[in-house]
Amino acid sequence: MIYGTFGIHPHETNNDQVSKDEIIKKINTNSKIIGVGETGLDFYYNNSDKDKQIRSFKNHIDAALELDIPLIVHSRNAEAETYEILKNSNKNLKILMHCFTGSLSFALKLMELNCYFSASGIITFKNSTDLQNTFKELPLGRLLVETDSPFLAPEPMRGKKNEPSFVRYTLKKLSELKNVDMGELDKITTENFNRLFLNK
């Protein structure tokens, strides 16, 4: 039941420029690596040069397309740039917006690209009403939940080191936002994961 993904985070692209072929070679070393990323753009911290982030992002996209596995996307303060790059990619690209915190308008545009959206502990935070309202609008068939462990522990564990067992608090909040039984949403999000990553 344990799977992995491989990618270079946008914060690390100054030091770790890897080609599409190098990404593919790394992923092919283990059959349990089932996704590319997380990758993407982070123009909030700008720990890496923007052009290098974009180049790395595109290399990861090309690798995901060649391997026909999902791309796991990090996007912070880069909605326009992220959307343009994804929109101009091959239509067969499978996309998961990791730890999604974007605007509703961004989410609706990404829906046109058949993206999936992962909810993290951030949706449980009291000051995250905009994000909560965005997740209310997203279809159940496109939702996943995640921990982003060891970061972003959900309420009531906020401030602690996050761990996978805390995902139940994120699921509970999402079930309240969607007005769906928690057990049913657990089943739906699991099915969404299996469909996206395991072709089940």
Image (tube, helix red, strand yellow):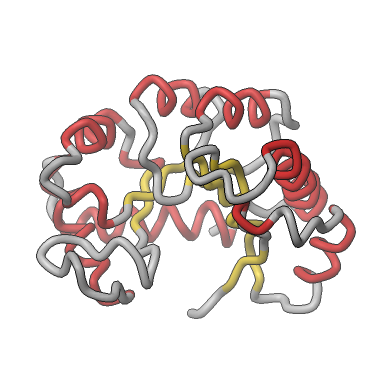
At a point 50% along the width and 46% down the height, the residue shown is 45
Quarter occupied by the C terminus: bottom right
At a point 65% along the width and 58% down the height, the residue shown is 12
Q: Which of the two residues, 129 or 47, is positioned nearer the viewer here?
A: 47
Q: List the single residue furthest toward the right.
A: 21
Tell how many labels: 0
Q: Is residue 156 left or right of residue 112?
A: left
Q: Which of the two residues, 105 or 199, is positioned nearer the viewer here?
A: 105
Image location (x, y in percent) of residue 112:
52, 23
Q: Is residue 133 left or right of residue 151?
A: left
Image location (x, y in percent) of residue 27:
75, 68
Q: Is residue 64 left or right of residue 159?
A: right
Q: Which of the two residues, 200 or 30, is positioned nearer the viewer here?
A: 30
Image location (x, y in percent) of residue 70:
62, 51
Q: Which of the two residues, 192 or 11, is positioned nearer the viewer here?
A: 11
At a point 74% along the width and 50% down the height, the residue shown is 60
In this view, 178 is above or below 196? above
In this view, 158 is above or below 1? above
Image location (x, y in percent) of residue 89:
73, 30
In this view, 83 is above or below 8? above
Q: Is residue 76 left or right of residue 82?
A: left
At a point 33% along the width and 75% down the height, the residue shown is 164
